[in-house]
Image: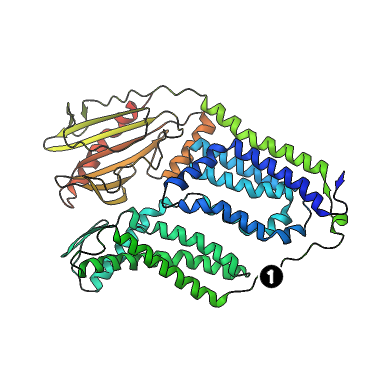
Amino acid sequence: MPVAEQRPDAAWRVAGATFLLLFALLLCLYLDTAASMAQIWWRSETFAHGLIVPPIFLWLVWRKRGALAAHVPRPSALGLVGLTLSFAAWTVADMAGVQVVRQLAFVAAIPSLVVAVLGWRIAWVIAYPLAFLFLGVPMGENLMLPLMNYTADFTVASLQLLGFPVYREGTFFELPSGSWSVIEACSGLRYLIASLTVGALYAYLSYRSIWRRAAFIVASVAVPVVANGFRALMIVLLAHYSDMKLATGVDHIIYGWVFFGIIMLLLFWVGSFWQESEAPDAPPAAGAGSLRTLSLPRLLVTALLASGLFGLPLMYARHLAQQPLPEPPAMALPATLEGGWQRDGRVTLTDWRPTFQNPDRQSTLQYRRGDEVVVVHLAWYGRQRQDAELINSRNFMIEQEHEVWSNVGEQVVDMAQHPVRETRLRSSALRLLIHDWFVVGRVPTVSTVRAKLLFARSQLLEGEDSGYAVVLWTPQQGEDPAARARLQAFANGLDAPLRQAMQP
C-alpha cells in the first residue's frame, strides 16, 4: 500500500517515526555499549570531545534538511546487510572482549539503520555526518607509546642539534639544568584527536571537493603530531633559560594548549585560501511524491527484520555469559627448575607487582641460582568478561607518574621459544628487567590483537576462552646484558613445568 502519493512529507512522517522507534530500540538493547562510550567521554580528558559529537551530528543533519526533503524514504535491503555485518562484528568483539570494536560496531549500525529504513539515497545526502559519528568512538590509545617515543626522539635530537649535552634513557632525558620525561599527557594524543575532530568538521563546512576535504583532514593529523615535538622542545628551552622557573609545573600544560591553539588557527587560516562556497540544497521536485512512493509493507518487513537482528547477538552473548568457569589450573610450579634454579620460600626482591584486574587465579614465586634472582608472576583468567579479562588497558606493568617506579623503555624482543615484551623499570634503589607474554590455549604471544583473535577463535571452536599472563623480572645494573640472559635461561627451564602447571 503506497503512502504519500502526492506529498513526500507524509512518507517522511511514517518512515521517520519508524526510524526513531528502531533507533530507540537499538539504544535500549545496547545501552551498555553506548554507556561505555559516554563514561569514557565524561572521565577522560583525551576523549572528552565525544560529548559534542552527537549534537554536532544532529546539527549537520539539520543543515541538510532541504536536500533530504527532495527524497522520499525507500527502505533498502543493503541496510539489512550492513546491520548483519555490524552485529556480527559486535558478537565477535564481545566474545573476544574488545570494547572498542563493540563500540565501533554499535556506531556502524546507525548508518546501516538509516540505509535500511530511509534508503541509500538519503544516507548518501548525510554520509559525511554519519561518518563523523565514528569520531566519537574512544580509540587511539595504542598510539600513545609511539607518540611518546616520537616526542622524545624529536626533543632530544633537536636539543643535540642546538648543542645541548643530553643523556637519554627511554622517554627520560637529562640536561645540565634539569631532568625531563615524556609522559602520557605529553604524547600529543589529546592534540591529535582534538585536531582531527575539529579539522573534519572544518573540512566539511569549508570544502565541497572530496580531495580538498581529504587533504585538510590529513593535514589535521600531521600538523599536531609535528607541532607537538616543537611544543615539547619549546617547554624544555623555556624552563632551561628561565633557570627552571617557568614551564615546570601546571603552567607548561597551559603553554602547550596556547601553542596548540595558535597552530590550529594557522592551519584554519591557510586552509581558508582554498575555501569553497557551499552548493544550495535543491528544493523538492514538483510532483515527486507521485513518482516515488513509500511502500508501507516493505517498511514493515524491514522494521521486523531489523528488530530481529538487534536481538540475536544479545541472546548469544547471554548464552555465553551463563557458561560456568572452567576448572582452574593448579599453578603449582616445582621447587627446582632445570638449570639449577631453586624456589625461595619468600618473595624478597621487591614489593613491585604487575597490575592485573580481577584475575580468577594468580601466583607469585621467587627462584634463586647462587646470587641470581628471578621472580615469576602468573595471572589466569578462566573466562573473558568485562573488568576481568587478560587483555585490558588497566592491566599494566606500571602506571604513569608512579611515586616510586618509572618506565624507562619497552620493546619486543625475540627470545629462544617466542617473542616477549621487555620492560625496564627504575626506582631510586633498584632497576628491574621484565619479560612478559600472554598464553591463549597453548599459543604464546605478545600481540594484544592476536590474543583477542585467539580468544574469539577458541570461543567459537571450543566454547571456552581461558588464558593467562606470564611475567618474569630480575635486577639489572644499567644496560647489563646479563639480566636478559638470566631471564632467558630461567624461561628455558620454566617452559615445560609451566605448561603442566597451567593445565586444569
Quadrant position of residue 214:
bottom right
Residue type of the residue flagged with mark 1: Ala
Q: What residue do we see at 26% from left, 38% from top?
A: 472
Q: Position of residue 25 (x, y in %)?
A: 65, 38
* Visible residue check, residue 130: no
Q: Is residue 437 above or below residue 156?
A: above
Q: Residue furthest left?
A: 371
- Element type where label 1 sits in the image: loop
Left or right: where does residue 53 sit relative to residue 282? left
Give the total of numbered labels.
Answer: 1
State the residue at coordinates (84%, 59%).
Answer: 288
Q: Residue at left 88%, top 54%?
A: 6
Q: Is residue 197 left or right of residue 204?
A: left
Name the quadrant containing residue 357: top left
Q: Quadrant of residue 316?
A: top right
Name the foreground residue: 173 vs 468.
173
**Colour scheme in the image?**
rainbow
Residue 46: percent from left, percent from top? 42, 52
Quadrant position of the N terminus in the picture: top right
Q: Quadrant of the C terminus?
A: top left
Give percent across and percent down for residue 311: 64, 34
Q: Furthest residue to the bottom? A: 273
**Drawn side of residue 409 relative to residue 32, left or right:** left
Q: Is residue 60 visible?
A: yes
Front one among 154 and 29: 29
Q: State the residue at coordinates (45%, 29%).
A: 383
Q: Which residue is mark 1?
A: 279
Observer-nearest residue: 23 or 63? Answer: 63
- Within-10-Å neighbours for mark 1: few <14, some 14–19, many 20+: few
Q: Position of residue 91 (x, y in %)?
A: 57, 37
